[in-house]
Image (tube, rainbow, N blue to C red):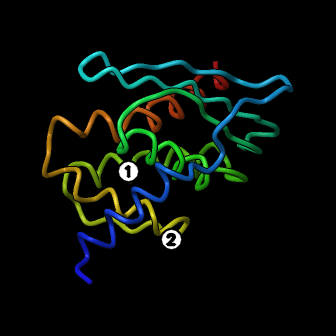
Amino acid sequence: MQLDDLYRRVIMDHYKNPRNRGTMNEESVTINLNNPTCGDRISLQLQVADGKVTDAKFSGEGCSISMSSASMMTEAVKGRSFDEALSMADRFSSLMKGEAVEFEELEDIEALSGVNKFPARIKCATLAWNALRKGIEHQHE
């Protein structure tokens, strides 16, 4: 099996079986973002305590890239400090620029590395990560 096929399968698995899709009942930080270029929308909810992301959920609609990226991101940041989560967001941005980056926290994220070959899709992949960044920055205000 070629790497591209494996990556496509990982992306489609997160799209068809999203992790952490839904909403939280308890008080949480909520960030709503959309990508007007293609119509992707995400509502990210973060449960935070003591400088950590204790839980993360998302809802919204969009292409397989944006929804699978949100699924992967929420899996990767749970239990992480704000600094660790922001570091992941920075590494994800580097991945989208075509730089070699490893995600020990969740290897599935590397499946999105091929997106950088399609500049119009980079905004799809980064939507959830931008919401994460805004949510954490909101906590620092």
**Depth check: 60 or 116 in front?**
60
Residue bearing mark 1: 92
Residue 1 placement (x, y as % from top left) = 26, 84
CA distance separating discs 1 and 2: 12 Å
Q: Residue at x 53, y 18 (%)?
A: 32
Q: Is residue 103 left or right of residue 28?
A: left
Q: Is residue 111 above or below residue 39?
A: below
Amino acid on which the number 2 mark rests in the picture: Glu
Q: Is residue 78 above or below residue 37?
A: below
Amino acid on which the number 1 mark rests in the picture: Phe
**SS state under label 1:** helix
Residue extending furthest toward the bottom: 1
Number of marks in picture? 2
Residue 16: mark:
none
Quadrant of residue 95 in the image? Answer: bottom left
Image quadrant containing the C terminus: top right
Residue bearing mark 2: 104
Density class for disc 2 (Cα within 10 Å; few <14, some 14-19, many ≥20) is few
Q: Is residue 42 above or below residue 65?
A: above
Quadrant of residue 57 in the image? Answer: top right
Residue 108 placement (x, y as % from top left) = 45, 65
Q: Residue at x 73, y 44 (%)?
A: 52
Q: Residue at x 26, y 23 (%)?
A: 38
Mark before the other along the chain sequence, 1 or 2: 1
Q: Is residue 90 left or right of residue 105?
A: left
Q: Is residue 79 left or right of residue 92?
A: right
